[in-house]
Structures are given as C-alpha cells and as structure tokens.
Amino acid sequence: MSPSRTVAVVGVHVLDTHVLGVEQIPAGSDGALVDAIRMSPAGTAGGTGIVLSRLGAQVHSIGAVGVDPIGDTLLALLAREGVDTSRLVRRPEVQTSASVLPVRPNGDRPAWHCIGANGAFTADDVDLASVPGLGQVHLGGPEFLGGPAAAELLAAAHDLGCTTSVDVLAPGDPDLLAWIADCLPHTDFLLPNDEQVLGFTGQKSLADGAHRLLEAGAGCVAVTQGARGALVVDAGGATEVPAYVVDVVDTTGCGDAFSAGFLRGISLGMGAPEAAELGCATAAQVAQGVGTDHGSYDLASVQAFAARAARR
C-alpha cells in the first residue's frame, strides 16, 4: 500500500438512524408505520472515511465513541467498510454520538442529535505516528478541539509529510471562525459548504468569502454548493465545478462524500478542480439513496459514471 493511499480521518464519528416515510410525529403515545429504518456511519470524519475506503484508500479512524451498543454498532459498520477502527477510543462516561433523522416523503429530514463522545475527544487521543505509511490527515470537526489544539495536530501531520484537510461541522458564524482560526495556516484543503463560507466571513459573494479564508491561511478552499456543485478557490483563481444530474433521494452525507472524492483525487495527483469533479461524482452516488453508505461503488465505477453522466 503506497503512502499516498493511507489516510487518517480524525474527529467526528456518528451513528445515523434514518426513519423513512415519516408523515407526522404521532400524538401522545400513539404509533405509526414507516417505510424503513436503517443505520449508517456518519460524521465529518466517520462518513468521509467509509467513502474514502470505497474509493480505494487505506483508512484509519481516530476519534471517540462510547462503551455502549451504539458504539458497538458504529464500529461494526465502519469495519464492514474496511476502515481500521483500532484508534477509536472508548469513553465509558458518555454515549456514542448519534443522530435520528425522520425523512419525510418530500425528502425533508429534520434531525435529533446527541453530541456524546465527540465532545469528549481531545488531541491527547491522537497518535498520528502510529499509522503506517500515512499520507493524508483529514480533520472533521476542528471546533471540538479548538483552534490551538487543531493547529498542533495539523502541524504534526505536516511534520510527518502528510497533506492536511479540514471540514467544519457547525454552521457558519464569525465567532466559530475565530475559534478555529489557528488551524487554518496548517490546512492545505478547507472543505466547507456555501452557507458556512458566507457565515464565517460575512461576504455576499462565495468567491470573496473563499478568498477571505485563503487570507486566513488555508491553502485551497473547495466549497460545496448543493445542486450547483462546487467552487474551488486557491492562489491561482476560482473554478466552478458543476454537479451531476441524478434523481436525488436524500442528501444526507453528500458533503462527506464530496470530501472523500476530493481527497482521493488529491492523493492520485489530481489538481484541485479535477479532484472536485471526482468529489461531485462521488456525492452523486450517495444522493441517490439514504445514508452515507448508500449503494455499491468503487473508484473505477465513479470515474465511469463521471465520464458518461450529464452535468448541470
């Protein structure tokens, strides 16, 4: 296994439970039938990790889960996807992070979420040097560590010769950007969504907002824009990357899938715009079903899809 294919996904790991066909919450203690209930690994580290594994990366998860059945299930689902879970620490004092998403017939998906063990994860739980042949470090949820701790982690990754990437989980807010600002000069690739970029920077133009994040230290900003695809901004300029046309069932996990495709592209030597095209094609696989682990695909099939599919 070449070093460039080995990636550590660090930070937020969640077990999602999707309840499909929820028309309303029953009154009192009444019940209702739904179409299906399924579980999937998720989170800006966990969800990205399983898609990276499908795309041919050797993935090592680093984070925290509880000592509970939810954690057992999450570990089993990650392992089933080929992710090394040996560096996920178990925290007996907290539950595993979990979400329940009632998916309405029209596709709306409100959510209930318990932060759980993700809130107990610290930089002391991370030993990057223990991962053999490490080539990439992806930090999902730097806000849980705080900027200085996240900066130390990413700087250590650079010292090991790794490329670094960051995906923020929380909504965009200037105070949150200030909270994590120390890590940006150590971030090769920042992977936010459009609402986060505008919220972080107060800019009305997405390109202007991305440039502000470059000025704050990020090497490249690849912004997801939902059905519009992605915008890649670096020192060389801004490139729009259109989304692929598919029948969208559920967008849960599409951002994590984009991150995985983008990072796999970077590991294969692609430039950022080309890597974003792979990211959009990967997100299109996930959008056609429910959960980050929807479907069955690998790098070759995603590339074949991208070659033949229509773009917006």
Image: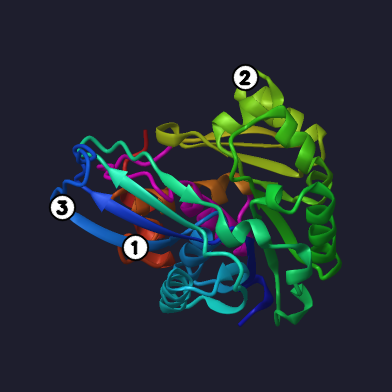
Q: Which mark is residue 205?
A: 2
Q: Which residues are magenta?
A: 243-271
Q: Residues within 10 Å of mark 2 (few under 14, many from 20)?
A: few
The secondary element bearing badge 2 is classed as: loop
Chain-order first, disc 1 or disc 2: 1
Three-letter code, disc 2:
Ser
- Label 1 or label 2, whichever lies nearer to me, is 1
Quadrant position of residue 88: bottom right
- Residue pointed to by mark 1: 39
**Residue with the most extreme front position:** 28
Question: Relative to 258, does residue 133 appear above or below in the rendering?
Answer: below
Three-letter code, disc 3:
Asp
Question: Relative to 253, does residue 73 appear above or below in the rendering?
Answer: below
The percent position of residue 231, horizontal first and vertical second, equals 57, 35
- Residue pointed to by mark 3: 35
Q: Residues within 10 Å of mark 3 (few under 14, many from 20)?
A: few
**Residue with the most extreme left position:** 33
Q: Is residue 44 left or right of residue 212?
A: left
Q: Residues within 10 Å of mark 1 (few under 14, many from 20)?
A: some
The secondary element bearing badge 3 is classed as: loop
Q: Is residue 114 left or right of residue 93?
A: left
Chain-order first, disc 2 or disc 3: 3
Three-letter code, disc 1:
Met
> Are the residues flagged by discs 2 and 3 in contact, CB closer than 8 Å?
no
Q: Residue at x 74, y 62 (%)?
A: 122
The percent position of residue 118, horizontal first and vertical second, equals 61, 59
Quadrant position of residue 70: bottom left
Q: CA distance from mark 1 to mark 2?
A: 37 Å
Locate the C terminus by quadrant: top left
